[in-house]
Image (cartoon, helix red, strand yellow):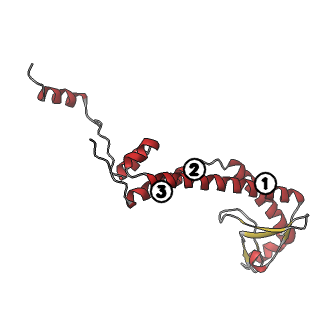
Amino acid sequence: MTKRTQLNKARRAIIEEYGFKHIESGIDRTRENELLQQLIGYANEAIRAKYPEADMAVLRKYEVVRTDHCLRFQFPSGRVDGKSFPSDASLADMPQHRGCYSGEVLAVSAECEQVFDAYEAEFQANYGLKNDRKRQFLDFVTASRTVEDVLEVIDLPADIRERLGHRSTALIAVSAESVFALRETFRIAA
């Protein structure tokens, strides 16, 4: 009977960390990112329409500008909706005391509304897919009792296996000469 490695809290945390990263990297966000870039373009157009570049140059000179990553939009349909953009989004700057927190709303085009809706749909679809996969993965890890139970289903990389204390029993970095010498040393007399 082979020794089985108990799946304790620390080992579960290592497996979960690996699994979450793997799940996140396995979701194709190409379309979502394309739509986000289009939405950023529309947001920058709306910001510059409200705050022309000529005015912003003066404000930049006196350092009274900011970049707001939370924006609210007024769509031609009459709907008002907001979006919190990622902190690394390249949004245009605006006067310091303006933006989402002040209740400011930017007028945008009908095309922007279509991109906004498409982006939200794509984002929600990817978010749902990620959560479904994470839930399925967590259910599996919770039901597993040993590292070997996990390895029967998920092929973990060597560095993760090492962190779990599951070392390979295969010959590693043994030269042909060493193998020959060991065979000679332990040869049973015929």
* x then y, percent, for residue 119: 75, 56
Quadrant where the N terminus sits is top left
Q: Which mark is residue 118?
A: 1
- Horizontal arrangement in the rendering, residue 50 relative to residue 32 (left or right): right
Q: Nearer the viewer, residue 30 or 40?
A: 30
Q: Which of label 3 and label 2 is nearer to you?
A: 3
Q: Label 3 vs label 1: CA separation? A: 31 Å
- Residue type pointed to by label 1: Ala
Residue at the spot x=80%, y=68% of the render? 81
- Horizontal arrangement in the rendering, residue 44 relative to residue 183 (left or right): right
**Residue count near mark 3 (Cα–Cα under 10 Å), binned few <14, some 14–19, many ≥20:** few
Q: Quadrant of residue 10?
A: bottom left
Q: Label 1 vs label 2: CA separation? A: 22 Å
When the figure is inspected, residue 87 is found, relative to residue 96, above or below; the finding is: above
Q: Which mark is residue 19?
A: none
Q: Earlier in the sequence, mark 3 or mark 1?
A: 3
Q: Nearer the viewer, residue 98 or 102?
A: 102
When the figure is inspected, residue 17 is found, relative to residue 1, above or below; the finding is: below
In the picture of the structure, the residue carrying the numbered disc 2 is 25
Q: Label 3 vs label 2: CA separation? A: 12 Å
* x then y, percent, for residue 77: 91, 64
Residue at the spot x=39%, y=52% of the render? 145
Residue at the spot x=65%, y=63% of the render? 88
Q: Earlier in the sequence, mark 1 or mark 2?
A: 2
- Residue type pointed to by label 3: Glu
Instruction: Name the secondary structure under disc 2.
Output: helix
In the picture of the structure, the residue carrying the numbered disc 3 is 17
* x then y, percent, for residue 75: 87, 65
Instruction: Name the secondary structure under disc 1.
Output: helix
